[in-house]
Image (spheres, helix red, strand yellow):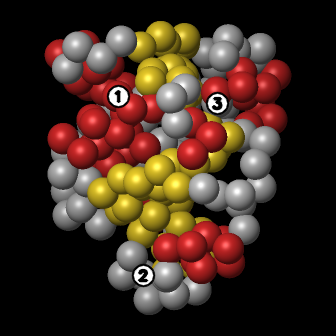
């Protein structure tokens, strides 16, 4: 059974990770998030779920909501084959997530550890605002705490310069 919002919040509590959360209407895009007038607006992450052309490697990219991501440049940075966005089917089967809910917390559902998480260095030593596996809430926590949580799940995570 996939890890959902309440389980993510319980995990944060049980891990002693400080966070702020705010429930809101379901949102599917960064533009919809901006219209909510959320606190810490400059710390909201845009999250992309991509795969290589052989569907062997999957990546979750978290960047500042204003940043444009070139998949070609990202491909060159990590030394990957050609990349494209993963399908909704892959998103659901691998991360247990629905469209509009892409988040690094999704790797908690990645039983086979297929997904590598890349967080833009913009978030280093800052808060990061992400969904807790559902797009009806945003959670802000220290990026370093998120990284440690992902590592504790034995998933791969790195902070890189995405331009």
**The C terminus, quarter of image:** bottom right
Q: Position of residue 45 (x, y in %)?
A: 61, 37
Residue 62 sits above or below residue 35 on the image: below
Q: Position of residue 78 (x, y in %)?
A: 50, 74
Alpha carbon of mark 3 to alpha carbon of mark 2: how far? Answer: 28 Å
Residue 5, located in which quarter of the rendered image? top left
Q: Position of residue 118 (x, y in %)?
A: 47, 55
Residue plotted at (77% across, 14% down): 37
Question: From this viewpoint, is residue 99 visible?
Answer: no
Q: Position of residue 48 (x, y in %)?
A: 58, 55
Q: Callout 2: 10 Å neighbours few (<14), some, many (20+)? A: few
Residue plotted at (53% across, 67% down): 50
Residue 51 sits above or below residue 127 on the image: below
Alpha carbon of mark 1 to alpha carbon of mark 3: how far? Answer: 16 Å
Q: Earlier in the sequence, mark 1 or mark 3?
A: 3
Q: Callout 1: 10 Å neighbours few (<14), some, many (20+)? A: some
Looking at the rendered structure, which numbered label has been put on residue 44? 3
Q: Callout 3: 10 Å neighbours few (<14), some, many (20+)? A: many
Q: Earlier in the sequence, mark 3 or mark 2?
A: 3
Residue plotted at (41% across, 14% down): 19
Q: Nearer the viewer, mark 1 or mark 3?
A: 1
Tell me the residue that label 1 is attached to. 145
User: What secondary structure is found at the residue carrying circle 2?
Assistant: loop
Residue 30, located in which quarter of the rendered image? top right
Alpha carbon of mark 2 to alpha carbon of mark 1: how far? Answer: 30 Å
User: What secondary structure is found at the residue carrying circle 1?
Assistant: helix
* Pointer 1 with pointer 3, Cβ within 8 A: no
Q: Earlier in the sequence, mark 2 or mark 1?
A: 2
Looking at the rendered structure, which numbered label has been put on residue 55? 2
User: What secondary structure is found at the residue carrying circle 3?
Assistant: loop
Residue plotted at (57% across, 45% down): 121
């Amino acid at each position: 059974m996939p890890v959902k919002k309440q389980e993510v919040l319980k995990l944060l509590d049980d891990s002693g990770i400080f966070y702020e959360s705010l429930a809101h209407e379901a949102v599917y895009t960064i533009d919809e998030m901006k219209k909510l007038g959320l606190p810490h607006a400059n710390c909201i992450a845009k999250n992309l779920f991509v795969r290589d052309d052989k569907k062997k490697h999957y990546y979750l990219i978290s960047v500042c909501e204003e940043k444009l991501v070139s998949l070609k440049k990202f491909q060159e940075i990590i030394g990957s084959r050609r990349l494209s966005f993963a399908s909704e089917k892959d998103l659901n089967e691998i991360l247990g997530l629905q469209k509009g809910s892409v988040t690094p917390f999704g790797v908690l559902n990645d039983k086979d550890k297929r997904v590598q998480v890349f967080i833009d260095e913009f978030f280093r030593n800052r808060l990061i605002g992400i969904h807790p596996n559902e797009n009806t809430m945003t959670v802000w926590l220290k990026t370093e705490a998120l990284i440690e949580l992902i590592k504790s799940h034995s998933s791969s995570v790195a902070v890189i310069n995405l331009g």
